Amino acid sequence: MIGIFHIAYKNLLRKKTRSVLTVLGIALAAWVLTSLLGFNRGYQNSLNKDIDNLGYQMLVTAKGCPYEAATLMLKGGTGLRYMNASIVDSIAAQPEVESVTPMLMQAVFDPNKGESGGISAYLGVDPATFPRMKGTLAMKSGAWFTDPAAREAVLGYEAAELEQREVDDMLLIPDLDVEIRVVGVLDRTGTQDDGTIFMPLAAVQEIFGQAGELTGIGIKVKPEADIAAFEERMYRLPDVQVVSLSQVRNTIMTLVSTAKVMVFSIAIIAVLISVVGVVNTILMSVMERRQEIGILKAMGAKARDIFKLIWLETVILCAAGGVVGSALALGTAKLTEVFIRGVLPFAPSGGLVAIEWTLALFTLGVVTLIGILSGLYPSWKAGSVRPLETIRSEVE
Amino acid sequence: MNDGRAIRAQHGVPAAPGGACPSIAAERLVKTYRRGAERIHAVDGVSLAIEPGEFVSFIGPSGSGKTTLINILGCLDNPTSGRLELCGRRIFEEGAALGESKLTDIRREMFGYVFQKFYLIPTLTVRENVMLPFVFYKKPGAEREVDRILELLGIADRRDHLPGEISGGEMQRVAIARALVNKPRILMADEPTGNLDVARSEEIAGILKDLNTKEGLTIVLVTHNMALARTARRIIELRDGKLHTPA
């Protein structure tokens, strides 16, 4: 026994080119929509991941130029203003704080670096808290320090290449004539950590004569904490300044969201154009089949039967377009990523376009819903055809 | 006395065996159209009765109101005034017509329609086209009935062909099969041979005659083709919307 779905499907085959073009129009709109939603999700995830890779959400430095502090945090510059190590305990005591890690950065001019010399950055870190907070740092070879005050170093990937040192090699700190032993080399991270020489905090304080001094304190906030309120309180602390990564994140997201609004507007317009296309196709089809619809009604089809038939045709078109468009978006996600990376002024290091099957299903749902809605008018129009229309042209 | 029987008596139509109600009983049917300020009486006071198992042909010149009349008799259109009964059931009465949904139920139950154009769906096979009415209302044994009708009309061997692959005469047989598949009491045929050559027209005439004589189907036919009209047991002529030959 044939069903109404069979009839609707066969009806669409009657004008194959028209049906295929309509499906293609919807597929393109679905493709754009899926890709943009995937980009939105992927970009945000990657940016968050990049920031999370820093290990902490806030950095406290001694009062000075805030841009210097930001540079220190993001690019490894040297903001050499000091604050007393005693502040670490008072920050750690705040209820929102999950953990803190004190740091002392020192920079030394190395005449043997490059052609005309260069700056080597030594970052004193707390062996108890730093590796744990920077969980994304992975060892290429060796391990972290054997003792909290040992004269040892862990080299970032690029620093190891530049200094041409491996585990168990000795490294000379220029000017000071102090030798330290390389105990570990890190994997590449794509961040400022690659060019850094990590040493135990106590050793840096001792070698550089900066006992009890710090240049920065990284703060990891509890997941449930009210970061905004905590930041407000930290801003009020004297002699220190606070750089919040949520601010950095927000600034970047604000910049990106302007572009996003534009692109989403284009996606919505594409979807609206495809809706108009669907309504047009179905209306044309109804107009061409008025007599035939009249015959169906003479045969005993009720208005709701015809409504259902035409509605089903619309939904089949939209669902087919949704399936093709979503599959296209899944299949071309990599290509889309290459394209977007080429046009974006700033792109995080992770995947930019995150299209999963749940997103493809969501788009399919949206497009089918659009089909359901855009089919209402043509279906109602078809349902209201009177059987007499069938033979009107033959009335004598 | 039943109103339908009164109409029959009034118009001198012999009673059906066993005193059954006439299939169609119409009294003073009027259908008026407006064209600008002009009023056109397409059907002008027609009263008639058609008995169960009758084969009636309506003839007349173009514009005489034949099609308008059978559209009203077949519940495809409402009259402007008058009264219509089908098998004793009142369908139209002055100022009160049944709603579209009720009319659809009556069409499903009582009528099969055949037109000059075949209106077959080109992407469905012959069998699927004949089965089309059952897409909209289920009936037990529908598939068996479809196959029986295809056999009866001699197109069983064409069941899996598309309409584009069969002749005009065969297409009209498919249209007739589709009209018969819901076991109607009355077959309304409006110029069923209008698109066919003489040989195919004779085939269709033969089929209609067989359906009437062997299956006992009531047939109401509109045609310009006098040879086809003579297949019927009663011929009614219409002129200017009025019965020319007393029914």
Image: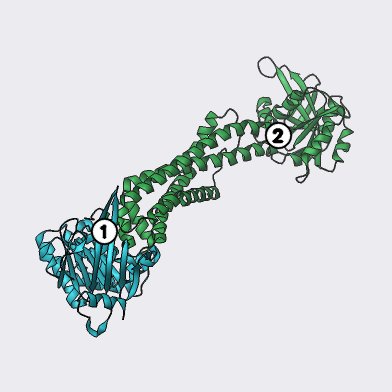
Chain colours: A green, B cyan
In the image, which disc is placed on residue A167?
2
Which residue occupies 24% across, 58% down?
Answer: B42
Up-down relation of residue A311 to residue B72 (above or below): above
Q: Secondary structure at mark 1?
A: loop
In the image, which disc is placed on residue A29?
none
- On the same chain: label 2 and label 1? no
User: Pointer 1: what residue?
Assistant: B120
Instruction: Give the quadrant of residue A135.
Output: top right
- Spatial distance from mark 2 to mark 1, Cα to Cα? 85 Å
> What type is the residue that disc 2 sits on?
Val
Is residue A190 visible in the rendered image? The answer is no
Looking at the rendering, in which quadrant would you find the N terminus of chain A?
A: bottom left
Up-down relation of residue B59 to residue A310 (above or below): below
Of residue B107 and residue A62, the one placed in the foreground of this image is B107
Q: Secondary structure at mark 2?
A: loop
Task: For label 2, count other residues whose C-alpha is less than 10 Å away and answer few (under 14), some (14-19) or many (20+).
Answer: some
Chain letter of mark 1 equals B
Of residue B95 and residue B173, the one placed in the foreground of this image is B95
Residue A234 in the image: state x and y as whole percent. Answer: 83, 34
Residue B228 in the image: state x and y as whole percent. Answer: 13, 65
Chain letter of mark 2 equals A
Left or right side of A318 for B196: left
Left or right side of A14 for B200: left
Left or right side of B181 for A358: right
